[in-house]
Each structure stands twice: as C-alpha cells, then as structure tokens.
Amino acid sequence: MKHSTERMRTLIRALLLAAAGTLAACGAFQEKPERPEPPAAPPPAPAPTPDKGDPQDRFDAAMALWQQNQIAEAESAFVSLVQDFPQHSGPWTNLGILYARSNRRAQAIGALTKAVSLNPQNKVAFNWLGILHREAGDLNRARLSYEKALQLDPDYALAHYNLAILLDAHLKQPAEALPHYRAYRSAGHEDELRVLAWIAAIEAATKPATPAPAPPPVGSAPQTEQTP
C-alpha cells in the first residue's frame, strides 16, 4: 500500500512538472503584441503660387516701353510674358518682331511660328513670317505666308505691298504683282509715288503694242487738209 501511494505521488509530481514545462514552452514562443506605429506626419502644405499679375496690364506696359524706344527693356518684358503666359499669341508676335528687327532671324521665325500655332488668325505674324522667309531666300514659303495673311484679311495693305514686291522683284511675275500694288494704293496709300511709278512701268511693259498705221497708197489724197 505504501509503495502504491509513493508511486501515485511520483506520477502526480511528474505530470505537474510536465505541465509546467509545457506552459513555460508556450510562454517562450508566444508572440508579443506589436507596438502601434507613430502617426505619419502630415504632408507639407504646397507653396503659394506667385502672383504673375494681369497679362493684359503687363502686355500694355511692355508696349509702352517699346513706344518709348526702350527696346531692351521691352524685349525683357515680352520674354517674361511668354514665360509666365505661354498660351498667349500677342507677346510671341511682338517678341518675334523685336528679334527680326535686330537681325536674329532664326529666333524671330521661332517666335512667330509659335504665335500662329497659338492663333491661326494672326495676320500680323503671317506677314512677318513672309518677310523673314523672303530674306532667307525661301520665296515659296514667303509667298504662302503673305497669301495666308490676305486670306485672313483681304484688305491688309502691308501684305498686299509685300506680296507685290515679292512677285515683281523676286519672282519676276509683274502681271501678278499689279493687282496687289493697286490694292495697296486703294487702302489709303494713293500718295506713294514710287508705287504709282511701279504700276505705270508694269502697265507699259504689259500693254500690247499698237500696230503702226499703214502708209497711204501712192498718189492718194492726204487724209487732212493742209494750208499753204
């Protein structure tokens, strides 16, 4: 009986030790709860957009500088305008004209091409493109540019004048130049004597020759009375 009791106690003690070891093992491999992440910092506020001013006011100010013959200042103002408002055709046009007048043909053509891409109705830019292409020797492109300006405004006197010069002096087509000279004079330039002289020269050159009258038959009476 005594041995049975001891065996029972030994068995119970072994079971308790085994249970304690299992709990210890479970505690060793138990995952710890994760620590919460600190809250993310809010994104920085966007920088305020700088005030570029009113484009029309800035355009008028640039034009005023040009009219006051402050050419460098005017050019800088138009450069700043096309940087801040690249979608407007007018500043590109005037910048192209300033480039053209200072013999920067490539830059002028670039600026004026940008102007007509933004506004296909820009007759002034097309006229200036005609001038620049003619100076570069591209006479066909010059003619197309002048003709485009006249499609937009059939009464555009400067385009008539420039196209007439191109046809007359460069393409050697004076008969085609004649109606453009006349249109230029009709647009309020009647006092330009040189244009009138060019018209007269073309008319004289293109007028069909009048045949000389046939001589009267021998022995016929004179056509008019003659007095002694």
Image (cartoon, rainbow, N blue to C red):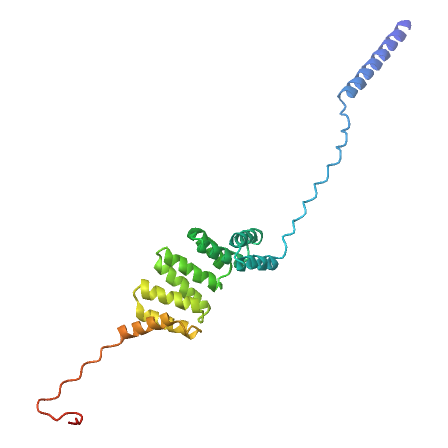
Give above or below for 192 relative to 31.
below
Relative depth, front residue between 101 and 208: 101
Relative depth, front residue between 24 and 181: 181
Residue plotted at (83% across, 13% down): 17
Task: Report whether 16 appears left or right of 70.
Answer: right
Q: Where is residue 3 in the image (x, y as percent from the top left)?
A: 88, 5
Residue plotted at (30% across, 72% down): 201
Task: Report whether 116 appears left or right of 222.
Answer: right
- Quarter of image, res 54: bottom right
Residue positioned most to the top: 3
Q: Position of residue 226 (x, y in %)?
A: 16, 93
Image quadrant occupied by the C terminus: bottom left
Task: Report whether 53 appears left or right of 192.
Answer: right
Q: Position of residue 163 (x, y in %)?
A: 38, 66
Residue positioned most to the right: 2
- Quarter of image, res 32: top right
Give above or below for 4 relative to 30.
above
